[in-house]
Image: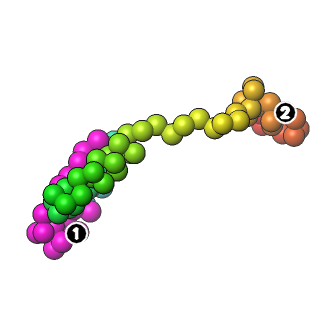
Amino acid sequence: MIIELDGGQHAERNEEDTKRTAALEAQGYLVLRFWNNDVLRNIDGVVESIVNTLRPVPPHPNPLPNGEREQAATRGDSNA
């Protein structure tokens, strides 16, 4: 994960920032961007956003006991 903090000059560099983000993401990085102002005035919100991004997605509360193959077999799908 890469966290970028952007100052006011980045308002005029949107195209360059978009290219930079795309290049980093193409290398497998996740890029989060925050304005300096947000960090200074809403650090709790910035931290919450980072934590939520890092937090794994919880498992489904009612998973199939034997996975999707069981459901496909019950339906009669031949690709199970």
Q: Position of residue 69 (x, y in %)?
A: 76, 31
Q: Is residue 46 left or right of residue 6?
A: right
Q: Nearer the viewer, residue 49 or 78?
A: 49
Residue shown at 84% from the left, 33% from the top: 73
Q: Nearer the viewer, residue 49 or 73?
A: 49
Q: Which mark is residue 77?
A: none
Q: Position of residue 49 (x, y in %)?
A: 34, 50
Q: Which comes before the other along the chain, label 2 or label 1? A: 1
Query: How many circles with numbers are drawn on the protein?
Result: 2
Residue shown at 37% from the left, 40% from the top: 54
Tell me if residue 2 is in the magenta stretch.
yes
Stretch in magenta? 1-18
Q: Quadrant of residue 78?
A: top right
Q: Amino acid at mark 2?
A: Ala
Q: Position of residue 37 (x, y in %)?
A: 17, 63
Q: Secondary structure at mark 2?
A: helix
Residue shown at 87% from the left, 40% from the top: 75
In the image, residue 34 sits, relative to residue 65, either above or below, namely below
Label 1: few (<14), some or many (≥20) within 10 Å?
few
Tell me the residue that label 2 is attached to.
73
In the image, residue 77 sits, relative to residue 13, either above or below, namely above
Q: Amino acid at mark 1?
A: Asn
Label 2: few (<14), some or many (≥20) within 10 Å?
few
Q: Is residue 71 left or right of residue 43?
A: right
Q: Which mark is residue 14?
A: 1
Q: In which quadrant of the rendered image does the C terminus lie?
A: top right
Q: How is colour applied across the structure in the image?
A: rainbow
Q: Nearer the viewer, residue 43 or 5?
A: 43
